[in-house]
Amino acid sequence: MAQSVRDASAGNAGPGGRITGPSAALYLTEPARGLLDLAALPLAAGWLASAPRGDGHGVLVLPGLLASDMSTGLLRRYVRWLGYDVHGWQLGRNVGPTSTVLNELPRALADLAASSAGVVSIIGWSLGGIYARELARDHPELVRQVMTLGSPFALTDPRQSHAEGVYQRRSHRHAVAGIPTRDQLARPIEVPSTAVYSRLDGIVSWQTCTEQETALHQNVEVRCGHLGFGVDPATLWLIADRLAVPPRERKPFRPPALLRALYPGSR
């Protein structure tokens, strides 16, 4: 399995350089690789415990398609242990942009900003990251930063995601109005953001989870599968590092020397 996954991660560009979906090898091994990421957590407990601690500000965590707050439980537990006022979305299973989601998420953001007396960091996994970016776009005054975990906000073709069919089968439950177009989703947001992606993602093309880097935006590569972002030790360390950046500063992510190998392309 390891060799097939390495081969599959070499790239996913089709004829003419067109970005295609992840390979079958990556897609079919997603569940097993997610379990491996989970199994690695105890081994990483020592250095995760040494990550930067928090200042108590509010953190809102949004799950991916068909997932609920249960899927982000370990991530939220770690963020809470670091000292943050962390909350799940509390809207049940994420079946897409329903009217309830579009109405309740802005309220949840405003309530958390009020209760924590400050701007909120938002962490969104997959589709949850797309919600996070749109919340920040509409309410930048309430958002400290956004972190997206394998979120295909730059998707241009449905074939770039193995989740597109699942999403479309639930489109009858989605809101009739208020859903941005793909072009709108790909536009930069006006708050600091970090896009976490993996070339081993078996659900969405990793290129669709990144954008051009600017003073406000950074892409960071890790080595987990799509189902592993919420438990991947490297991703958790990155989240701790980003949450600890003061609200008026923009400091690019630079992993410690001993952890640099966990972040391909890092300097």
Image: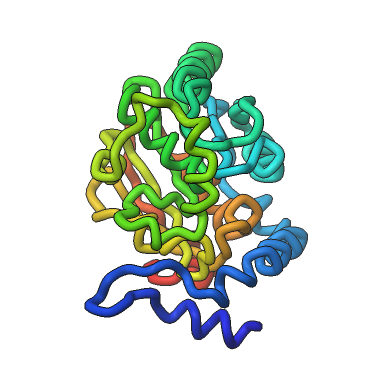
Compared to 7, does 205 lie above or below?
above
Residue shown at 43% from the left, 23% from the top: 119
Residue 122 horizontal/vertical position (percent): 48, 34
* Among the 4 quarters of the image, the one containing residue 80: top right
Compared to 87, does 265 lie above or below?
below
Residue 141 horizontal/vertical position (percent): 33, 21
Residue shown at 44% from the left, 71% from the top: 264
Residue 172 horizontal/vertical position (percent): 50, 33
Q: Quadrant of the N terminus?
A: bottom right
Question: Is residue 241 among what the camera can see?
Answer: no
Q: Nearer the viewer, residue 54 or 12?
A: 12
Compared to 131, does 112 lie above or below?
above
Residue 89 horizontal/vertical position (percent): 59, 28
- In the rendered structure, the answer to whether residue 85 lies left or right of residue 81 reads left
- In the rendered structure, the answer to whether residue 24 lies left or right of residue 68 reads left
Colour convention of the picture: rainbow
Looking at the rendered structure, the number of numbered marks drawn on it comes to: 0
Q: Quadrant of the C terminus?
A: bottom left
Residue shown at 53% from the left, 44% from the top: 169
- In the rendered structure, the answer to whether residue 204 lies left or right of residue 33 reads left
* Among the 4 quarters of the image, the one containing residue 13: bottom left
Q: Nearer the viewer, residue 173 or 163?
A: 173
Q: Nearer the viewer, residue 53 or 147?
A: 147
Residue shown at 70% from the left, 44% from the top: 74
Compared to 162, does 132 lie above or below?
above
Question: Is residue 145 among what the camera can see?
Answer: yes
